[in-house]
Structure formats: C-alpha cells, structure tokens
Image (cartoon, helix red, strand yellow):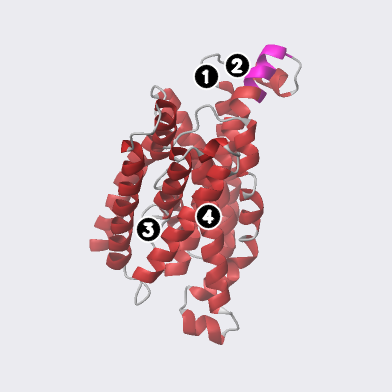
Amino acid sequence: MKAACRTVPALVFALAALIGLGALSLAVGDARLTPGQLLDGLLRRDEFAATIVWSIRMPRLLIALLVGAALSASGLVMQAYFRNGLASPGLLGVSAGGAAGAVVAIGCGLAAVSLLTVPLFAVAGALAATGAVILLARRGASTERLLLAGVALNALLGAVTSYVLSAHTITYERNAQILFWLIGGLEDRTWEHVWMALPILPAALLLLPLGRPMDLLSLGAEEAQSLGVDVRRLRRRLLGLSTVLTALATAVAGTVGFVGLVVPHILRLLVGPEHRGLVPLSLVAGAAFVVGCDLLGRAAGDLRLGIVTALVGGPFFLWLLRRGER
C-alpha cells in the first residue's frame, strides 16, 4: 500500500513531465513555434507549421519516446534478472552487441537490401552478447564478475566495429552511417524509423504482467520457485524481452548508454523496489529522460544523444560506486 502511495504520484509527475518535454521538443528548433503555431501545426491548420511538426519533429520525438522507454525497461529487467542494481544493457555489452550487428550489416552493404536488415542484425548481435554474458557469469552474478564480463565484451565488440571501419572496401557514406550507430543520436529520423521501432510497444506491454514475478525473483530463485514461479521460464522471458527492447532501440538510435542504469536506479530510490509499480513508471520516466536529454543536446549546439546521456550517466555511475563503498 505504501509503495502504491509513492508510485502513483511519481507516475503522474513523470507523465506530466513527458507531456511538457514533448511539447517543448515539438516547439523548439531552428524555427521556433509559439503555442498557437504548435497547435495549428498539430491540427494541420497551418501548412508551414504542420510540415515542421509532422515531417521533422514528430518522428524524432516518437523515436525518443520509444528508445527511452525501451532502454529504461530493459535496464530494470536486467537488474531484476541478475538481482544486481549495477546491471544494465550498456554495461553488460548488450547495446554494443546490437550496435556491432548493425555495423556489420551496414559495412557489408546489406542495409540497402531491406529496411529490416539493420534491426534484424542488431537483434542477432544483442542476443549473442546476452548469451556471452550469461555464460561468463553463470556461476555467480556478483558486481565485479558482471562488470568484467561487460568490459571484455565491449572491448571485443569494439574490435569488430573497428575492423569494419578500417576495411578498404568501405565507402564514405557507410562510414558515416557506422559512426552514427557508435555515437547514438536522433538526427534525420523519419516515419520509417518510427515503424521500425514500433515493436517496442508490444514488447514493453508484455513486461507489465511480469511485475509480481520479478518481485518474487528478487527474493532468490529457490524462494520464487517455492512460491509457484517457473523461474527458468521467467528468466527466459525477461532476457528475451530485454534483449529485443535493447536491440530495437539500438537499431533506430545507435548506442545510447546509461539510460538503463540511471532511470531504474533513481526510481528505486524514490518509490522503492516493487516492480509492479516500477515497470510502468520506468517506461514513462525513461521516455521523459531521453526526450529531456535530446532537448539538452539540441540546446548545447546539437550534441548527439549518446554524448548527452554519457555526460549525465557517467557521473551518476561513479556516485553509485562511491555510495556502495560507503
């Protein structure tokens, strides 16, 4: 009951922040729109404002919403799976695996074959990275073991992307595309990218009924099993959904780090560890966080999204390590 009393106001606040940041994202840019112009553009009463809103800024905003929700929820699931507050898709190499898969597809010229090629390769790369982490940490999921596994995987996957970048056959256009995936950003996103990221919605909805099983899993595998949870099946579902969410987010926005670490941690500090409230809250708060970081990047001279989230998340991660030592 106490957790619900804290979760509901936090969810209302996150929704209000998301709406405000979303409206600001649509209004701010090279051509600033007043509230009246923004409304006219949304209702298509002004052709110029409608073109700016629906053709340029709305796809970018929707991608930011989907990517933020996906990465935040994925980080929450990873932390519940490993019962470790420092686990996240970026630190464990899942994001790097998705980026490496996308880079290989672009470098080999397969991205021109179909719009689905890059996300499919991203999913395959993220799945491979996830499998490697599980193998490396199967005897224990301590913070040190997971971090070392993530460092090793990120280094290995970085070597793969570096090899593709250094290949003699790669063109300047492909090189620029690869750099986009490595840095992460929302520039030049179109409605095609929105449709590509749309499967994030059903994947995120599948997480909503798993809140209580995740709470039981946090007690330990044996305790959860004794309370009627099929632990093996639950872990497969959590890992699969987390990987798909991360891969789809990476496929449309490149490598965007720290979202899955920062947002779930802040929410746990605010409302507690109950996943039934944390799952929907992380989806909304993660979307608001990425929209806010995108706005910060645009205000700072068009900094890429991956740079802004790293500038925000890096110090937060160091603070978590310091807090753990104390």
The residues bearing labels 4 and 2 have C-alpha atoms spaced at a distance of: 32 Å
**How far apart are the two marked residues, 1 and 3, measured between alpha carbons?**
35 Å
* Residue 235 covered by magenta stretch: no
- The residue carrying mark 3 is 92
Depth check: give the residue in front, 229 or 116.
116
The answer to the question of whether label 4 and label 2 lie on touching residues, with beta carbons closer than 8 A, is no
* Dot 1: element: loop
Residue at the disc numbered 1: 29
Q: Amino acid at mark 2?
A: Leu
* Location of residue 122 in the rendering, given as x and y in whole percent from the top left corner: 50, 49
**Image coordinates for residue 94, horizontal then vertical, percent:** 43, 55
Q: Amino acid at mark 1?
A: Gly
Characterize the local packing of mark 3: few (<14), some (14-19) or many (20 or more) Cα atoms within 10 angstroms.
many
Please rate how many residues cluster around mark 1, counting C-alpha atoms within 10 Å: few if below 14, some from 14 to 19, many from 20. some
Q: Amino acid at mark 3?
A: Leu
How far is the residue under mark 2 from the one under mark 1? Answer: 8 Å
- Residue 73's tag is 4
Vertical side of 141 occupied by 199: above or below: above
Residue 204 appears in which quarter of the rendering? bottom right
Which of disc 4 and disc 3 is earlier in sequence? 4
Q: Which residue corresponds to mark 2?
A: 33
In the visual, does 277 lie left or right of 156?
right
- Which residue range is magenta in the image? 46-54
